[in-house]
Amino acid sequence: MQPAAPQPQVQPVQPAYMQQPPAQHQQPAPHQQPAQHPAYGYPQQQQQHSYAAPQPPPGPQQPKRKTKRNVLLATLAALVVIAGAVGATLALTGGKDGKDDVGKSGPSVSTSTTAAPVDNPTDGPTADTPTTPAPTTSAPPPSPESHPGIQLADGYHVVIGDPDLKPTEGLDEDMYYYCSSMASECHFGADVTKFVLLDQGEKGSLDTCLKDTRYTREIEVARLSAGSQFCATTDSTVALITFQHASKSTEASTYAVIDVTVWRNAIPPTDDQ
């Protein structure tokens, strides 16, 4: 029996990344020259690179942080722009002197105008709308003045406009009393004053005397009785005469006793006065 042949010794196998390439003679690196196109007929030498471990891919570039210097520069740039806009505005408008420059140095971004209020056409009267005249305030009626027991003798008169209505001799003025010696008749007469004899039992007043227009210039005493009334109207004064009685034939003088009520300025003056 032959002895067993010796087995060849097996060398352990190393992984690929552990294997080292065979050492090569390193050439000294020549000085780098600017890239030039290779000359014809001469092959371009390739640079030999040593093997190195793989590098991870570059990540996203981090943003640069703003520094105080950048903020300051941006602020200055904004101020320059604003100053330029202000200068352009003043150059276009021509500027204003004095107080008009106060409060108007900055440019206005927007200008809003408020429309003036428009009157409502229905607020005031129109041509088609009838207007009601304002009511006029009438003056209060004058106060009556009472003058009782006036004794008006034959041939005398009284002036209704006088304050005391004292009888005065003469057949003129507002109202006089006259008796004829031949006919033995007496009457109240006037040259300008208008008389109105009221009906029996009619109560005289200012309103009655102003409305009644049955004018006359003479009223006979024979038509009167105690309490009879007649109106006497001048240009501005109204009087109400109340007959009391006449003198008797046996008396030494001839006269009549009357009560007079006067409303002064009861008639407004006219243009002719």
Image (cartoon, helix red, strand yellow):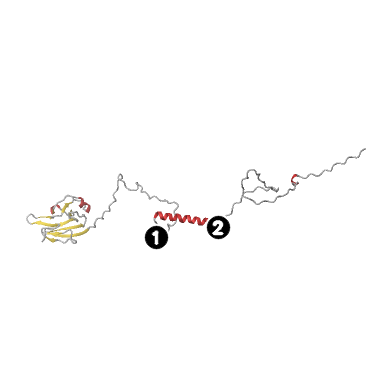
Q: Please state the horizontal and vertical placement of residue 122, each as a whole percent of the image.
A: 35, 46
Say left or right for 3 vs 265.
right
Instruction: Residue at the far front: name it.
Output: 41
In front: 34, or 114?
34
**Residue 206 seen in the current view:** yes
Quarter residue 182 falls in: bottom left
- Residue at left offset 48%, top offset 56%: 80
Say left or right for 267 vs 68.
left
Tag 1: residue type?
Lys
Total count of labels: 2
Quarter residue 187 falls in: bottom left
Q: For the residues labelled 2 and 1, say whether their Cβ atoms are less than 8 Å apart.
A: no
In front: 155, or 221?
155
Say left or right for 202 vs 172.
right
Q: Please state the horizontal and vertical placement of residue 22, each as a whole percent of the image.
A: 75, 47
Instruction: Residue at the far right: name it.
Output: 1
Label 2 or label 1, whichever lies nearer to me, is 2
Mark 1 — residue?
Answer: 99
- Residue at left offset 45%, top offset 55%: 84
Mark 2 residue crowding within 10 angstroms, few (<14) / some (14–19) / many (20+): few
Question: Is residue 245 placed above or below 51 in the rendered structure?
Answer: below
- Which is nearer the N-term, disc 2 or disc 1? 2
Helix, strand or loop at mark 2: helix
Q: Please state the horizontal and vertical placement of residue 151, each as a whole percent of the image.
A: 15, 60
Q: Please state the horizontal and vertical placement of residue 226, each as a whole percent of the image.
A: 17, 55
Tag 2: residue type?
Arg
Mark 1 residue crowding within 10 angstroms, few (<14) / some (14–19) / many (20+): few
- Residue at left offset 10%, top offset 56%: 179
Mark 2 — residue?
Answer: 69
